[in-house]
Amino acid sequence: MCYDIKASLEAQLKRARQYGDEIAIREIEQKLAPLTDLPLYHASGFQHPKLLIYTEEDPAMPEVAIWGLIPHWVKDEDQKKKIWNNTLNARGETIFEKPSFRTAAKYHRCLIYVDGFYEHHHFKGKTFPYFIQRKDKEPLVLAGLWNRWKEPDTGEYLNSFSIVTTEGNPLMARIHNNPKLEGPRMPLILQADMKEKWLIPVEDEVDEKAIQELIHSSPEEELEAHTVRKLRGKDYLGNVPEISEKIAYPELKE
């Protein structure tokens, strides 16, 4: 699964900078960035942080969105709070089937630029967190689903998103070994030629099949991983830069 990420403003602006519009970049930094929770050296989806996503509406200009997709059919705040802990991730194999995701899967997919993500390794009854990133330290482009939900009490619109997951590659199989899960999972990381295809709305079964063909694990050789400090409990340092730094656990050398 993918419940913990690292996302800097610089990583989140990577796509916008590719379009070379410095005026737009300054506008994002001045108007949108203050509305987010960036920088996120470590954030759990269960905290429902706000960050930037790129949608099919304007692929070059990001939107502020909260982590935990709120489907269009959610009626009120109570129902929102009940569902959004269950929509942090969307299993890629079933996004066109599940009621919470199928509308977004067809018409509202998005890109989430992050520095990396965290996963827990289980060993002799204990868990050890790992940080996973690209070897070249470039941002990971995660596939997402999003929706714009109207808050009934205020009439204001709230953007929300879910991170799509897929089967884990061999690297993740070595790390993500939760005995309660059927198998290793990982976020759907989009390669360069997949990003634009992911944003195209689905019109028919052919389009849907084309999207499903994008849902597979990324090459192991592009990623690297190292153990980091605890992300839960009394030893957790919080959202600080050193949280993603490498730290060794003697137990894992046994």
Image (cartoon, rainbow, N blue to C red):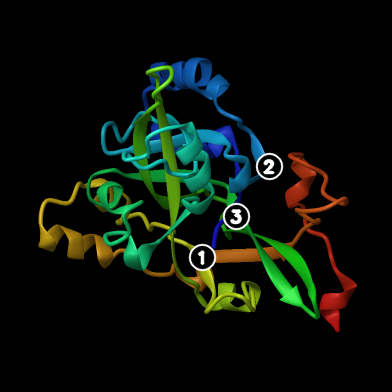
Q: Secondary structure at mark 2?
A: strand
Task: Report x, y in % for residue 145.
Answer: 36, 47
Name the residue beneath numbered marker 1: 186
Q: What is the quadrant of the C terminus in the image?
A: bottom right
In this figure, which residue is indicated by the disc labeled 2?
Answer: 41
Q: Three-letter amino acid code at disc 3?
A: Phe
Sequence-wise, the earlier of marks 1 and 3 is 3
Q: Residue 107 in the image: x percent, y percent? A: 23, 45
What's the residue type where badge 1 is placed? Met
Disc marking residue 11: none
Q: Dot 3: few (<14), some (14–19), or many (≥20) neighbours within 10 Å?
A: many
Q: Residues within 10 Å of mark 2 (few under 14, many from 20)?
A: many
Q: Secondary structure at mark 3?
A: strand
Relative side of 252 to 159, left or right = right
Residue 83 in sight from this viewpoint: yes
**SS label for mark 1:** strand
Q: Are marks 3 and 2 in contact (CB under 8 Å)?
A: no
Q: CA distance from mark 1 to mark 3?
A: 9 Å
Q: Relative to 31, is 240 on the left or the right?
A: right
Pointer 3 residue: 117
- Residue at 68% of width from left, 42% of height from top? 41
Q: Residue at coordinates 39% horizontally, 45% vertically from top-left? A: 111
Label 1, label 2: how far apart the Cα atoms are: 19 Å
Nearest to the observer: residue 194 or residue 42 = 42
Q: Position of residue 28 (x, y in %)?
A: 46, 21
